[in-house]
Amino acid sequence: MTFKPDTPLVNAVHPARNHEPRRGGAKASILVLHYTGMLSAEKAIDWLARPESGVSCHYVIDERGRITQLVREDLRAWHAGASYWRGETDINSHSIGIEIHNPGHQLGYPEFPAKQMKAVIALSTDIVRRHHIAPDNILAHSDVAPGRKIDPGEKFNWLQLAKEGLGLWVRPLPVRADDPGLGLGAEGPAVLAAQQNLAAYGYDVDANGRLDADTEKVLKAFQLHFRPRRVDGRLDRSTEVTLERLLEASRRRAAA
């Protein structure tokens, strides 16, 4: 069965089988960006549409910028998996998922082509406008599933999106080679403050003052999105300040 696409930007419809009504009458308030992690967009679309895959998404954007819709936006696609953002654990019911074709880290991880990024911006702008999605709810899969997922990764150009009014972005404090930061097992007020700030922004982290394995995963997720120059899960001054700037920008936006 086919359906009418939700936006005129769609080039093709390829209906997926794995979807259902959004639970509890939820509406889309989050946009989650992924990469496919497969050799070709065609293979990704085919797999995402198959019932045996156990997954699906709303849209796939290939490297040429062609947009394929697989699930209607009013339905719950199976793209986020076990995830969390700002207290919500059923991200699938509250989000729209875009898969951006890229083979991913295990298959060479090339740059995202300009035509593809142009299509990501156009589709995201259209979705955000229609669903009134807040900038700080435009997220990476790695943001909502730290450690379990790392896509779309450090090469994805979040700054380019922000320049087009998509997502929240602040200038990262430059990375210093002589500042390795705190690593696993570190404890103290700096770790606690970072955990509190990460949680305040929306990440799932326990503010216990100890840089444990879960905190390291969340720090990596934050760095993948907001400080991609060095993704190591360590708490250096660049990460601390960039996080503080981001949280302040989020608070200013909320108060406006």
Image (cartoon, helix red, strand yellow):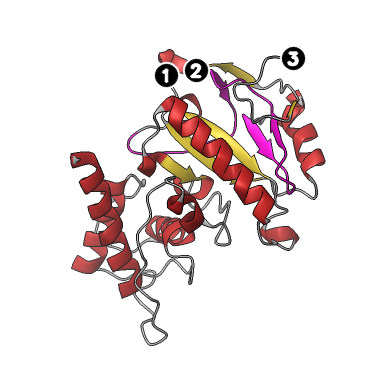
Name the spot of residue 235 as percent of width and height, x first. 35, 69
Q: Where residue 196 is drawn, which disc sits there?
A: none
Q: Tell me, yes or no, whether the two marked residues, 2 and 1, touch with CB atoms within 8 Å.
A: yes
Q: Is residue 161 above or below residue 12?
A: below
What's the residue at 42%, 85% (across, down)?
Answer: 177
Q: Which residue is mark 1?
A: 26
The answer to which of marks 3 and 1 sits earlier in the sequence is 3
Secondary structure of the residue carrying tag 2 is loop
Query: Does residue 84 show up magenta in the picture?
Result: yes
Secondary structure of the residue carrying tag 3 is loop
What's the residue at 37%, 67% (across, down)?
Answer: 172
Q: Which residue is mark 3?
A: 2
State the image quarter where residue 122 is shown.
Answer: top right
Q: Amino acid at mark 3?
A: Thr
Give the magenta range: 58-87
Q: Is residue 208 above or below residue 55?
A: below
Secondary structure of the residue carrying tag 1 is loop
Name the spot of residue 243 as percent of width and height, x first. 31, 60
Q: Is residue 139 above or below residue 184?
A: above
Q: Amino acid at mark 2?
A: Arg
Q: CA distance from mark 3 to mark 2?
A: 19 Å
Which sits in the foreground, 165 or 84?
Answer: 165
The answer to which of marks 3 and 2 sits earlier in the sequence is 3
Query: Does residue 255 show up magenta in the picture?
Result: no
Q: Which residue is mark 2?
A: 22
Which sits in the foreground, 33 or 114?
Answer: 114
Q: CA distance from mark 2 to mark 1?
A: 6 Å
Which sits in the foreground, 80 or 122?
Answer: 122
Dot in front, 3 or 2: 3
